[in-house]
Image (cartoon, coloured by chain):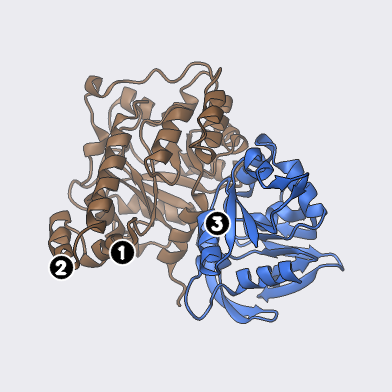
Amino acid sequence: MLNNRWELNKNLAQMLKGGVIMDVTTPEQAKIAEAAGACAVMALERIPADIRAAGGVSRMSDPKMIKGIQQAVSIPVMAKCRIGHFAEAQILQAIEIDYIDESEVLSPADDKYHIDKTAFEVPFVCGAKDLGEALRRIAEGAAMIRTKGEPGTGDVVQAVRHMRMMQAEIRRLGSMAEDELFEAAKQLQVPCELVQYVHENKKLPVVNFAAGGVATPADAALMMQLGAEGVFVGSGIFKSGNPEKRAAAIVKAVTNFTDAKMLAELSEDLGEAMVGINEQEINLLMAQRGQ
Amino acid sequence: MRLGVLALQGAFIEHEQALQRLGVDFTEIRQLADLEHEYTNKNCKLDGLIIPGGESTVQGKLLHDLELFQPIQELIQHGMPVFGTCAGLLLLAEKISNDERCHLATMHITAMRNAYGRQLGSFFTEAEFKGLGKIPMTFIRAPYITEVASDVEVLAEVNGKIVAARQGKQLVTAFHPELHNDQHYNDAVHAYFLQMINE
């Protein structure tokens, strides 16, 4: 076996499983997230809810700001680059980021091509709405997948839709006859070997987290019960009344996601949740960015 | 034989798969009730505990929040065999050289967190493990051991750094044996732990 970066990068995602990755905008928030039990933080200048409110073009964060967060915490630090913006990704790799999120939350830089992630040493996580999208990103070199959901809304409906879609398609592939897999690969627009893998293992070849709209311990438990291996919480924590308490409660909810009694206790007295926007009320569907 | 697998966060499923391959019964410990379930007449019936890789800060915090810290620490102090990988090593270390926190602190070793740097420093190698020959070792944002007390036996070194050690019934590796399931390897380190339990 060689020193296979993709293998090592997939392995890091395995270590994040059962954990919560939190969006943070300052070293102070990063410390709060780490103390609350985040297994990694996503460093960004503005959380998705504020990006949505501000409008305009949204880009990679200032490397200085990201470095400040890297110095503040000992857990892995992730950062976002625009879809297709491989120069932003090169910059993030140069500051030794632990994971790059090629993210639909930022304005896409390329409306056709995603980054060739096989050309990088650092790992990438990418969003997906369904199995085809997930496998296309993996074929491009992503070492971790997350559902897109609808970032910055506090509305979990789209994360649920994407996770259910992915799981249903995995079940469908799993029950196919061998000779049907070629046609499935064609329909999904993905390499045959990846379809073969899903057929045999009944799961994605990389870790799959839930993201986009998770705001409460119950939301996190819902996503875990639907098959997520961990959750990203973006705006849900630092847009709420009591970030410390809510963050810690979501961490515990992910560990004990089937224990309704504990979830009930965790859901008590969390203060105000982020206000949120319903799916019907938003003009910009970030999940539609990148196919 | 029945083992507990600490399942608070991290790569615990990979350890469970290794135990399945070796035909060993196990249970997940996610909260105090899971541990209490394994007691009869104040005696814990578990034959050992595995602490998986993941984030030591997360697992350390959850051990306290879920009231598992004290009972697990006492079980280990009273001789329950324990096997910690990566974050598990950090949870068992008496001292962490670059972190003021320490956790269960039952093993007389000093460890360094993220000793190889960030993810770009993660690597795979093959190296000698005492009694097992050359085995595959995957290091992910891994620690290594900087100091050991006289009652600690060093089991493996990579580039002059201690990456596996044993003290009585406690076994730690800085690498992840649970990530390898190829036929030549045959879960050798897990089998070593099972043998330790039986000694």
- What's the chain of the residue with tag 2? A
* Residue under label 2: A179
**Horizontal placement of A231 versus A194: left or right?**
right
| Residue type at the position of mark 3 | Arg
Q: Residue furthest right?
A: B150
| Residue type at the position of mark 1 | Glu
Question: Is residue B85 positioned above or below A283 on the image?
Answer: below
Gap in Å between the C-alphas at discs 3 and 1?
33 Å
Mark 1: secondary structure: helix
- What's the chain of the residue with tag 3? B
Q: Residue at x 21, y 38 (%)?
A: A288
Question: Is residue A62 positioned above or below B159 on the image?
Answer: above
Q: Could you tell which of marks 1 and 2 lies nearer the N-terminus? A: 2
Q: What shade has chain A been given?
A: brown
Q: Residue at x 43, y 27 (%)?
A: A215
* Residue under label 1: A200
Q: Position of residue B154 (x, y in %)?
A: 76, 72
Which of B47 and A207 lies nearest the eye of the viewer? B47
- What's the chain of the residue with tag 1? A
* Residue under label 3: B118
